[in-house]
Image (cartoon, grey):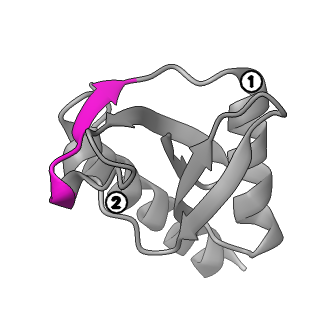
């Protein structure tokens, strides 16, 4: 799973399907739309908060023992994710950055 976290919330998510164990889109995996559970969303958001990352791609594996974070990317790609979501990810990032700048200017 790849969850895209922006400013403390998950804005988009996908499942990556591959014929090999590596599920990178760049290696030929296919992105599939995915609606994460509250537990998975909370895990991704908390992981991002723990390391102080406002924009992140959190990779999670599901198992019989629950979800596991595999990787947290502080500069996540979203080309594959953008193909399976209606969310304008670049637009969301721009809006978030503008809001953060305005907050900073008010201080």
Residue at 77% across / 63% down in the picture? 49
Residue 32 within the magenta-colored segment of the rendering:
yes
Residue 49 within the magenta-colored segment of the rendering:
no
User: x, y percentage for residue 85?
Assistant: 29, 28
Q: Report helix, strand or loop for mark 1.
A: helix
In the rendered view, would you say 19 is above or below 71?
above
Residue on which disc 2 sits: 94
Q: Report helix, strand or loop for mark 2.
A: helix
Image quadrant in which you'd find residue 22: bottom left
Residue at 38% across / 48% down in the picture? 92
Image quadrant in which you'd find residue 76: bottom left
Residue at 51% across / 19% down in the picture? 35
- Distance from Cα at disc 2 to Cα at disc 1: 26 Å
Instruction: Compare residues 83 and 22 and report the one nearer the observer.
Output: 22
User: x, y percentage for residue 77?
Assistant: 30, 62
State the quadrant of the C terminus. bottom right
Residue on which disc 1 sits: 38
Position of 56 with respect to 53 (left or right) is left
Instruction: Compare residues 44 and 29 and report the one nearer the observer.
Output: 29
Position of 2 with respect to 45 (left or right) is left
Residue at 30% across / 47% down in the picture? 20
Q: Which residues are magenta?
A: 26-33
User: x, y percentage for residue 81?
Assistant: 29, 41
In the rendered view, would you say 101 is above or below 7?
below
């Amino acid at each position: 799973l790849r969850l895209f976290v922006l400013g403390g919330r998950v804005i988009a998510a996908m499942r990556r399907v591959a014929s090999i164990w590596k599920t990178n889109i760049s290696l030929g995996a296919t992105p599939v739309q995915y609606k994460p559970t509250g537990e998975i969303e909370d895990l991704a958001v908390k992981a991002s908060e723990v390391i102080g990352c406002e924009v992140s791609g959190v990779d999670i594996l599901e198992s019989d023992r629950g979800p596991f974070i595999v990787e947290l990317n502080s500069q996540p790609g979203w080309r594959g994710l953008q193909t399976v979501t209606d969310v304008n990810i670049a637009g969301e990032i721009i809006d978030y950055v503008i809001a953060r700048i305005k907050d900073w200017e008010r201080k």
